[in-house]
Amino acid sequence: MTGETAELMSHPAAWTRRDLLDLESLSLAELTTILDTACAFKRATDGCRTRLPLLGGKTTANLFFENSTRTRTSFGLAAKRLGADVVDFTASSSSLSKGETFIDTAKNIEAMNVDVMVMRHRTPGAPWLLSQHVRCAVINAGDGTHEHPTQGLLDIMTIREHRGDVRGLTVALVGDIAHSRTARSNIWGLLKLGAHVIVCGPSTLVSRGWEQYGVEVAYSLDSILPRCDVLNLLRIQFERQSTRPFPSVREYALLYAMNAARMARAKKDILIMAPGPINRGVEVTPDVADGPHSVILHQVTNGLAVRMAALWLVCGVKDRTCPPATGVPTGCVVV
Ligand code: NCD
């Protein structure tokens, strides 16, 4: 057994939560614990290539009520790398279409002795609501426009890997801030770790309300670009919008797409990130997405490490009857 594996066998004292629902409510110690655990998993598994069966005998269930490629695959693979059994649930082929509520569906799946439920849902607060009804652990894999904690963590892990520390860096989240759960999780995590966070995009998609949390609000990418150490380019979430936020995609791309001309005016060591799926030619041009500054695929690999860490940490909480998170998280409307 390597030293790394031995270190991973003991549950860190800083982690006592049954669920991982958001980054807003995590303490700095909890954030650091999960990021450090993810790094340890990455090292102990040769960059997330090999198995480390610490969760043998455990079962995780992927409950995805919304489409997903990266997150679902990543949670499934992370559980398998840890030796757990994985149950995959797809809303469209389930009894939801026969009128069952999602809580009843989840309770039935839990009755098959599931230890962790990983949930994606279009309603903000749905994983929190689920956590009030089940005894197993719940991990939020994206709830509407609210949060996507493991995406925020894998983004931050990628920045830490390339820059050593997040403190003091200027990180701009560019695009559809209003509808992006990735933006929200990044904001809470990055602020706690001491980054200077800028949200940038059309005024219809970026609220001045973020200023009260110490976030800089900008409407011109060209004006902030020379100061940025990291750009996280967010997709325009047309599926969550009720009105068109700008006249045309072409105009959006002219003002906000990261392209070769803008790269020439950026810092020499700028990191280009995107949570995916990327829309080539809209938020980023192909030469930049595939270029030397892009760490987009590193983010995907780190997603595996973060999800291994999240599954391992919530499974290690001994007292399964410990109370679930209290209080409705901010930014959620629970229905
Ligand atoms: C994000 C999501 O689903 O919130 N993608 C992801 O999980 N990798 C971002 C997006 O859909 O644009």
Image (cartoon, rainbow, N blue to C red):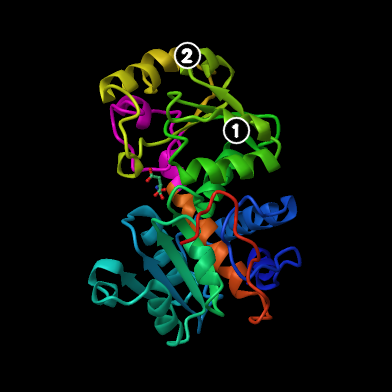
- Percent across and percent down for residue 59 are 46, 79
Q: Earlier in the sequence, mark 1 or mark 2?
A: 1
Asked if residue 134 is among those painted magenta in the image, a careful observer would answer no
In the rendered image, residue 159, in percent from the top left (x then y), is placed at 57, 38
Q: Residues within 10 Å of mark 1 (few under 14, many from 20)?
A: some
- Left or right of 219? Residue 193 is right
Give the main secondary structure, helix, strand or loop, of the magenta stretch. Answer: loop
Q: Secondary structure at mark 2?
A: helix
Q: Residues within 10 Å of mark 2 (few under 14, many from 20)?
A: some
Q: Secondary structure at mark 1?
A: helix
**Inter-mark Cα distance, 1 to 2:** 20 Å
Residue 210 bears which disc, if any? 1
Relative image position of residue 327 (x, y in whole percent): 64, 62
Q: Which residue in the protein does label 2 denote?
A: 222
Residue drawn at the location 58% of the way across and 69% of the way down: 312
The answer to whether 243 is drawn above or below residue 334 in the figure is above
- Residue 10's quadrant in the figure? bottom right
Q: Specify the segment rendered in magenta.
A: 273-299
Q: Is residue 280 magenta?
A: yes
